[in-house]
């Protein structure tokens, strides 16, 4: 881009909106339209008419479906297979936590289980008042792993971040 071409951006304000997962899949009950195609969406229609819009599918992946954080990193110019600290770290940083070099972070959901410990609602009814539960969990001590400490931090709604802190922890964990 030349200096003359770049001047067109100097006094412009840009609104960059990412609506993760919006494209979705075609659904038979919607006459094989996606929920986006079937929806009444005058505000989105206005934004597209007055601006630019598009669909992005990250090209880094061959077999597995990319995660939200993979796609967001790709949109910002990072190669998600080379530069992805993981969902837990991203969520922890987003909450303003001070993460140490050897910490291992997880993003989790509170869930509801039945009497057989089977998960019956992976979002616990989208519970949002989890402060007391988190405070109680943060008081727990796990005798078997005395050299490892942990804490939970409330995120949004039913979500939380779990941080494990100790020596010789491995970051090689899966989603």
Image (spheres, helix red, strand yellow):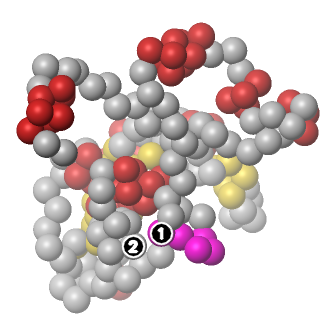
Sequence-wise, the earlier of marks 1 and 2 is: 1
Q: Image point 53% across, 70% down: which residue?
A: 61
Which residue lies under the disc numbered 1? 60
Where is the N terminus found, in terms of image quarters? top left
Residue 101 horizontal/vertical position (percent): 14, 73
Q: Is residue 107 visible?
A: no
| Residue 81, label in figure | 2
Residue 2 horizontal/vertical position (percent): 13, 42
Density class for disc 2 (Cα within 10 Å; few <14, some 14-19, many ≥20) is: few
Residue 25 vertical position relative to residue 146 in the rendered view, above or below = above
Q: Main secondary structure of the magenta part?
A: loop
Q: Image point 18% across, 28% down: which residue?
A: 9
Q: Is residue 151 left or right of residue 12?
A: right
Q: Image point 79% across, 42% down: which residue?
A: 26
Residue 62 magenta? yes
Residue positioned most to the left: 3
Q: Is residue 58 left or right of residue 147?
A: right
Q: Secondary structure at mark 1?
A: loop
Q: Is residue 76 visible?
A: yes
Q: Secondary structure at mark 2?
A: loop
Mark 1 and 2 residues: CB-CB less than 8 Å, in contact?
yes
What's drawn in magenta, residue-wise?
Answer: 60-64
């Amino acid at each position: 881009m030349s200096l003359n071409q770049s001047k067109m951006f100097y006094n412009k304000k840009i609104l960059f909106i990412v609506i993760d997962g919006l494209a979705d899949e075609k659904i038979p009950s919607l006459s094989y339209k996606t929920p986006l195609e079937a929806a009444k969406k005058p505000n989105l229609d206005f934004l597209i008419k007055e601006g630019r819009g598009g669909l992005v599918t990250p090209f880094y992946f061959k077999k597995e479906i990319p995660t939200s954080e993979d796609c967001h990193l790709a949109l910002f110019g990072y190669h998600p297979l080379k530069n992805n600290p993981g969902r837990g770290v991203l969520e922890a940083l987003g909450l303003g936590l001070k993460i140490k070099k050897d910490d291992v972070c997880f993003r989790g959901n509170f869930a509801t289980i039945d009497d057989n410990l089977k998960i019956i609602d992976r979002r616990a009814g989208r519970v949002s008042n989890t402060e007391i539960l988190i405070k109680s969990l943060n008081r727990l001590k796990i005798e078997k792993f005395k050299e490892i400490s942990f804490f939970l931090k409330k995120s949004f709604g039913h979500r939380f971040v779990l941080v494990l802190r100790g020596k010789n922890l491995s970051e090689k964990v899966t989603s």
